[in-house]
Image: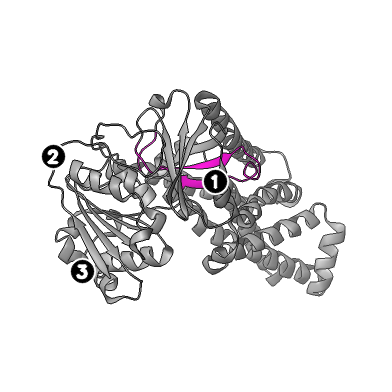
């Protein structure tokens, strides 16, 4: 293991040297981005969601006379109806969180949306399975027949029930693919296609809800409220997934300007377009990119910008890990690009303190390099890499260290080497950055590095609210 330290001694401004022939970097150093406070927005949205949940379940309580649940079958059926209303509402919330509606991402933040969506998804799967089990058991008890007989009766005699069972099957499949261990071994493209099937659950469950829901099948204010909620979620989905991306791409009309090899397995893609000086993006944010070239056009992948905005070009730096990323090395200048974004709260605008510590591993340096341009001067950066050849954008980082008065440590070696393990321990972090507990900490890199660093930071006294982890998808 070796550790290299660059001290921010020079005060002159320089142009960062690069490998390759892409557009030159802007000579000016961006100023620190002022912080925004997003906790109030998250609390407000959470209150609205909880209010909607209460409003969706209370009508059942009001329509159920006291003393009417006097048998096991009726109790089970009542519990099934409550879990059905709960599951139906949570499904709408899930689709709303998937809508990529820009105000939601601003109020909550893409990373928090990801966490909410993941946690609510697990709850939804449990609620759907509980609803099915309770209804089948309750109906079987009331009809005085076996559970298999009741299942057969539901599938053959009840309208939309086959679609409801299919929706439950899709939900279970999504729940399984959401397990972290399963997610890691699935190709991104397969996981993404499977995840999009979540929209089918909304369509498959709609008819069942309104045909058999005790409060929904008859006209009235409750039915009207649920129809309004479905309509609102559909509008949000169309606006966030179709209208906003169309407006963005017709406005900026992005194209590939150059592709530069940063290392044998990493490339930077430079993009130009129209009105880039009006593009509202921050260092650390990401777009979902679709390159309209042969072999690439049918996939959209999330990549962070690896340089702060300058009004002239954008840049992403990508490690080749599969066929799609390998194809990016062969992109021709002029290739059209479809982008959706920007998104993410991994930015200087979402900090809570004046000082920052940035920790990156491997290609995770891409958003961190852009972020280093916008956090206040005096930041510290710890960059983990397996070998010296794996260090990306080294000259730019050294230039930024001088221009932004930052400290940079390059920690080289295997994850099992004692040196890197010591540096990224609680004691090692406090040794390098004595005031680490009073800084915002930004983390981006392999999951193992991020998880170990979070544990070390917590032991070093860093509050969880000051730890920011780059998250692109679920």
Residue at screen point 47% across, 55% down: 265
Q: Is residue 69 visible?
A: no
**Does the segment drawn in magenta span residue 288?**
yes
Q: Eyeballing the image, is 139 above or below 314?
A: below
Span shown in magenta: 281-308
Mark on residue 328? 1
From the image, give the main secondary structure of the stretch colored magenta: loop
Give residue 50's position: percent from left, percent from top. Answer: 47, 49
Residue 307 visible in rendering: yes
Residue at mark 3: 428
Task: Point out residue 280 in the picture as x, y percentages from the top left corner.
Answer: 39, 31
Per the model, the C-alpha gap separating discs 2 and 1 is 37 Å
Q: Nearer the viewer, mark 2 or mark 3?
A: 2
Residue holding disc 2 = 11
- Observer-nearest of 396 and 448: 396
Q: Is residue 154 magenta?
A: no
């Amino acid at each position: 293991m070796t550790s290299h330290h660059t001290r921010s001694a020079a005060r002159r401004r320089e142009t960062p040297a690069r490998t390759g022939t892409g557009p030159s970097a802007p000579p000016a150093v961006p100023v620190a981005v002022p912080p925004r406070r997003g906790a109030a927005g998250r609390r407000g949205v959470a209150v609205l969601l909880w209010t909607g949940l209460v409003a969706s379940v209370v009508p059942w309580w009001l329509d159920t006379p006291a003393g009417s649940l006097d048998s096991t079958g009726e109790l089970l059926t009542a519990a099934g109806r409550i879990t059905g209303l709960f599951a139906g509402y949570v499904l709408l919330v899930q689709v709303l969180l998937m809508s990529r509606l820009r105000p939601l991402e601003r109020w909550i933040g893409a990373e928090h949306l990801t966490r909410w969506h993941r946690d609510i998804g697990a709850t939804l799967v449990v609620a759907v399975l509980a609803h099915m089990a309770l209804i089948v058991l309750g109906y079987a008890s009331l009809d005085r027949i076996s559970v298999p007989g009741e299942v057969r009766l539901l599938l053959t005699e009840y309208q939309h029930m086959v679609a409801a069972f299919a929706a439950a099957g899709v939900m279970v499949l999504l729940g399984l693919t959401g397990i972290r261990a399963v997610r890691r071994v699935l190709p991104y493209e397969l996981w993404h296609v499977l995840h999009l099937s979540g929209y089918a659950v909304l369509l498959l469950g709609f008819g069942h809800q309104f045909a058999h829901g005790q409060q929904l099948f008859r006209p009235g204010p409750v039915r009207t409220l649920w129809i309004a909620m479905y309509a609102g979620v559909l509008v949000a989905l169309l606006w966030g997934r179709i209208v906003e991306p169309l407006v963005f791409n017709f406005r900026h009309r992005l194209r590939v300007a150059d592709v530069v090899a940063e290392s044998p397995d990493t490339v930077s893609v430079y993009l130009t377009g129209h009105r880039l000086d009006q593009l509202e993006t921050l260092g650390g944010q990401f777009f979902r990119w679709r390159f309209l070239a042969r072999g690439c056009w049918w996939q959209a992948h999330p990549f962070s910008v690896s340089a702060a905005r300058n009004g002239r070009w954008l840049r992403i730096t990508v490690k080749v890990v599969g066929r799609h990323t390998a194809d990016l090395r062969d992109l021709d200048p002029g290739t059209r690009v479809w982008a959706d974004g920007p998104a993410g709260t991994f930015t200087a605008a979402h900090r809570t303190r004046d000082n920052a510590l940035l920790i990156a591993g491997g290609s995770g340096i891409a958003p961190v390099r852009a972020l280093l341009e916008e956090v206040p001067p005096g930041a510290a950066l710890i960059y983990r890499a397996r070998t010296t050849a794996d260090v990306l954008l080294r000259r730019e980082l050294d230039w930024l260290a001088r221009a932004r008065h930052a400290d940079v440590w390059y920690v080289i070696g295997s994850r099992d080497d004692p040196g890197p393990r010591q540096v990224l321990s609680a004691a090692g972090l406090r040794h390098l950055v004595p005031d680490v507990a009073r800084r915002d900490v930004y983390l981006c890199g392999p999951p193992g590095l991020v998880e170990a660093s979070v544990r070390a930071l917590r032991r070093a006294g860093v509050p969880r609210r000051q730890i920011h982890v780059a998250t692109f998808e679920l």
